[in-house]
Amino acid sequence: MTIRSTSPVTGRRRRRATAPLALALAAALVLSACGGSSSDATDSGSGTGDPVYGGVLRNSLIDPGTAIDPVVVASPGGVGVVDTVTEKLVKVNEDYEATPVLATKWAVSDDNLTWKVTIREGVKFNNGATLTPADVVATYERILADDSTSPAKGSLAGVLTKVEADGQDVDFTLAKPFSDFPFLLAGNNTQILPADYQLGTWQDSYIGTGPFVVKTFQAGQSVTFEKNPTYWNKDEIYLDGIQTKFYKDQQSRVLAFQSGELDGLYGEPVAASLTSALNESDYRVESIPAGGFSAFVMRVDQAPFTDVKVRQAIAWALDRKAISTTIYGEQADIGNDTIYGPTFGVRPDGLEQRSPDADKVTQLLGDKKVAFTITTDSVDESYALLIQQQLRKYPNFDVKVDVLSTAEYYAEGANTPWLSADATITYWAARPSPSQFNNFLYRTGAEWNASHYSSPELDTLSDEYDATTDPAERQKIVDQIGQIQYTDVPVIITTFGNTRRYLSKKLHLGIFPGGADYTGAWLDK
């Protein structure tokens, strides 16, 4: 078996962008690792000067509510804590390329079934232990274990069959060719933990190889981080520490930022209706095209959503431009009920763009009455209420909204609301590969398939997409996948909201397409 070397930035995605989007992307990419100038015309900060060491960043997260463990964490707040302390083999940079972190390079065999990944030497966990390939092997075996409940299993099961150490390398053996495999190594819940790590114990030690360590953690209140003195890339970490406050809802975050308690408002989406009172001239405002979206998921195995006409009627009833305006301040890419957003290299062709159409709603439903409840948490409360308002304009729909705390919404167990309620709205952060969205949201039997949808044809097409690198062939496959998602519509995706960030004039951040990466972040003295 021979191994072909590949670039550490394997899988670059060329965007088929409209002219305005292309300009926005170009502006976004001007942002350097230390903040740079804003991609938004309302930038009022200096955006210049050299990074300086020191200072403690004050930020916020929605309260995770429950215990945090990197292997199984799902709540945005919990992920934010984990990503500050731990690292993955690979990250996705601001140009949506796979770039090394704990890996230094990778290569693929001629049959495209074995990826050899070289592990960075000299890295230490924050308890002093040295990172070894054995830790990497154990991390992935833990994810793939028969009794694993890790969300990462949804993207790796059926793809990854064996993980073995080979000197300073780790060999990942696949069940089928997967040309975007390095992007899976940047996926959620793939943080590298020690070989002897025991599930559920992370908050006993907050173990990780990342640039910060947890100094204090007060459940429901705050977490403070300080710079990891043994971090392998510590010269690129300018901050002395981070003070993160937990809030129950987005409005509380906005008010805290407006009062000066926080240095930035970023990381989790905040509806434009909540930030409209902010005086943008007081801040550096950045709007960065992103691939995240709020998924309106309907359980296809439960009435009324067993009827595909009901799902299609809802999709044709929604005013996507109004959602873009109200929720994102027009800083969004309009969606069309497929997972292919502006950060992927391909998008489906041939689909009629959905917009509010009362005639089509009537054609699909006639006089049929449809009643249901949308369940969500505070992250998507404004979005859910807006959808309720829009659907109530039609005589067919009677919609209620049930807003739970983050702890309630992401509660552990088989009946966790975000995966079991009849209709839910959940924010999905950008993923490096479209296959991850397909495998999480649509794959038959997937752990996070909240709609309980199944399409063997879509599963097969997704596998075919993964196996090929030919752009023309990929486009054909995506056209077919998009048609299925658009027609069956178990998930409504109205918009891909830009990452819109409000920063104090002294704060300089990089772009975080793949997690909370504070490399290069700094504060003016």
Image: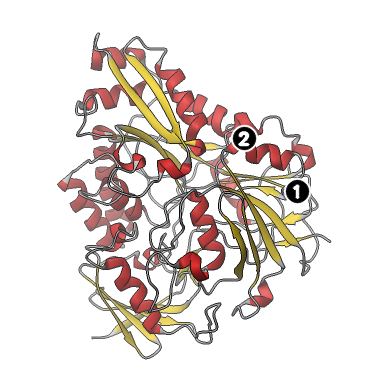
Q: In the rendered view, would you say 73 is above or below 398?
A: below
From the viewer's side, name the closer residue of 27 and 198: 198
Q: Name the residue under label 2.
A: 251
Outermost residue, left side: 456
Residue 415: % across, % down:
29, 42
* Residue at the image point whose x is 48% and y is 30% from the top: 383
Q: In the rendered view, would you say 394 is above or below 155?
A: above
Picture quarter containing residue 278? top right
Q: What residue type is labelled 1?
A: Ser
Q: Which colour scheme is used?
A: secondary structure
Q: Quadrant of the N terminus?
A: bottom left
Q: Is mark 1 on a helix, strand or loop?
A: loop
Disc sitting over residue 412 in the figure: none
Q: Quadrant of the C terminus?
A: bottom right
User: Could you tell me if residue 395 is visible in this image?
Assistant: yes
* Residue at the image point whose x is 52% and y is 79% from the top: 125
* Residue at the image point whose x is 42% and y is 77% from the top: 194
Q: How far apart are marks 1 and 2 (CA)?
A: 18 Å
Q: How crowded is mark 2: few (under 14 residues within 10 Å), some or many (20 or more)?
A: some
Q: Which amino acid does label 2 sit on?
A: Gln
Residue 74: % across, % down:
42, 52
- Tally of marks: 2
